[in-house]
Amino acid sequence: MNRGIRLGVLLAGFVATSVAGAASVVNSVHNLSPSGPGTVRAAEESGVCEFCHTPHTSSPVAALWNRRSPGTTYQPYTSSTALAAPGQPTGASLLCLSCHDGTVALGDVLSRKAPIRMAGATTMPPGRGRTGTDLRHHHPISFVYDANLAGRKGELAMPSALPKQVRLDHAGQMQCTSCHDPHDDSYGQFLVMPNTNSQLCVECHRKDGWTASPHAQSAASWNGQGRNPWPDSKERTVAANGCRNCHETHQTGGGPNLLRHAVEEDNCVACHSGNVARKDVMSAFNQVSAHAVGLTSGTHDPGEDAVVSARHVECADCHDAHRGSGSAPGQKARGVDINNMPVKRASRDYEVCLRCHGDSPGKGTPRVRRQLDQGNVRLEIQPGNPSFHPIAGPGRNQDVPSLIAPWTEQSIMDCIDCHNSSAAASGGGGGPEGPHGSSIEPILARRYITTDNTPESAANYALCYSCHSRDSILSNESFRGHRQHVSDENTPCSVCHDPHGVSATQGNGSNNGYLINFDTTVATPSAQGLLRYVNQGRYRGTCDLACHGKDHQSEGY
């Protein structure tokens, strides 16, 4: 052994002896000598530090580096929401990769003419520690983290606000060593500080609303059934795992956005199948009518336009996991307002719905063929329309005797009042709230039959009767023909009424008040070729149409 090698061994032995406490590299898997605690060790070499450092014949970089550069080209991290543009690894990250990318032998050090002989794996074995050369599934590294980036991103801490443990390099770049200290494994995974409750993550990532969110505060734990939501974590509650409920920093399944699983909804399944969260939301997607989160994969992107252009739905289209998980104030995802303008944080449920059910293309054939087929819910619920259900504003009709308390003419509805799980607690069931799925099409909270010749009953029109008094309707309080049509002739409510509304771009107050928009498979033109309703004032009007074999010519009431 030459003098340089002997000095390196002596240095390694000195460092190992002097730092052999709890924070020592000696007690970690970075000790690749035969005395190391890991499964990958040298066959004979007794030095601890020599696998990375040497006092002589080192690489011309910092830290007396004893390893050669991998000399490979990497695929850096990329994402539609990332403003930083990581290039090829530099600095300390490149040094780490000389072992962790798995391309260079662990014993291949500059201070030796021949590599140190290893007992077992020659290179970094497969597992969480091996990055490979594809870094797209790992937290980005080797990018400048400065005030300009933090200011543009809006949810990153300013560099000056980072704690002393989180270190940028001399060039102001984020490197592996910003989060990991290779000499100290006190906190596990060589982290520079504890990450319980995502303590380390939030030093950089200041997600708007995170600290008050359920994912940051919930003490819920896994009940032991189904998939373990935290297989690689020592933490056992939602709050303690924090960001790791959905994200990983290395070897992620989801690539961009560092999601644990590549299939978007799988990141929600483990907790929201009733095994951590109280309600089993995921089973609702198996109902007859549901938002088909499993139909597409890889189509959703957090950087996509507010109005969905490629038809899809994922949990993240409606829920902001960083801020909340439901429809409580401040917990909604982004949306589109009534004027089709994107909003960063939806203030009402319908703004979330309009991302897909407004101006997006490819919505398919309407379930009921209308005289005026619209299909764009944003246009159907406009407060300036001839008629509309009061979703974006109070209703136009201020005389509705059939309303059941607490509903009044000044009330404003939410989409979820009609489109909800048929098993939801609000309807007397034990299931979760929300339009995840229902046994009643199209994701309805209660039955609403649109098939002609349906016998009238409280059950068949339960959706309508949840707001409008059945007694009032059948006693003809607002229209003298209600009972005759609905009960005697078995004509569904939907034959005359369009529940969302009639757009001002198609209808008018004379013909389309009171949600009148005929189902053309039942109501057809009269013998004179007319298909119309004419409003003639309070509780008065006429109809021209043919229905159930009877011709109505300006028949009034």
Image: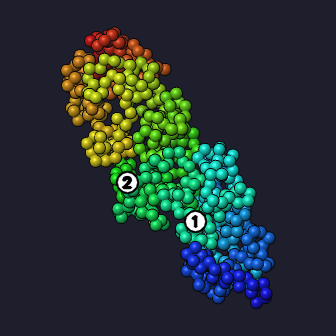
Q: Is residue 126 visible?
A: no
List x then y, in percent, for residue 34: 60, 85
Q: Secondary structure at mark 2?
A: loop
Q: Residue at x 59, y 64 (%)?
A: 192
Left or right of 132 on screen, residue 406: left
Nearer to the camera, 481 or 379: 379
**35 versus 348 height, above or below:** below
Q: Residue at x 64, y 49 (%)?
A: 158
Q: Is residue 448 visible?
A: yes
**162 versus 488 height, above or below:** below
**At label 2, which amino acid type do we have?**
Ala
Residue 366's image quarter? top left
Left or right of 73 on screen, residue 552: left
Nearer to the camera, 77 or 139: 139
Q: Secondary structure at mark 1?
A: loop
Left or right of 305 on screen, residue 114: right
Q: Residue at x 61, y 50 (%)?
A: 157
**412 versus 183 height, above or below:** above
Please identify the residue farthest to the front as the structure is shown.
18
**296 versus 492 height, above or below:** below
Mark 2–mark 1 distance (CA, rounded to whole Å) = 29 Å
Q: What residue does disc 1 label? A: 191
**At label 1, which amino acid type do we have?**
Leu
Give the position of the C terminus as an image quadrant.
top left
List x then y, in percent, for residue 66: 73, 76
Which color scheme did the rendering employ for the protein? rainbow
List x then y, in percent, for residue 322: 49, 48
Between label 2 and label 1, give the one nearer the viewer. 1
Residue 40's image quarter? bottom right
Q: What residue does disc 2 label? A: 277
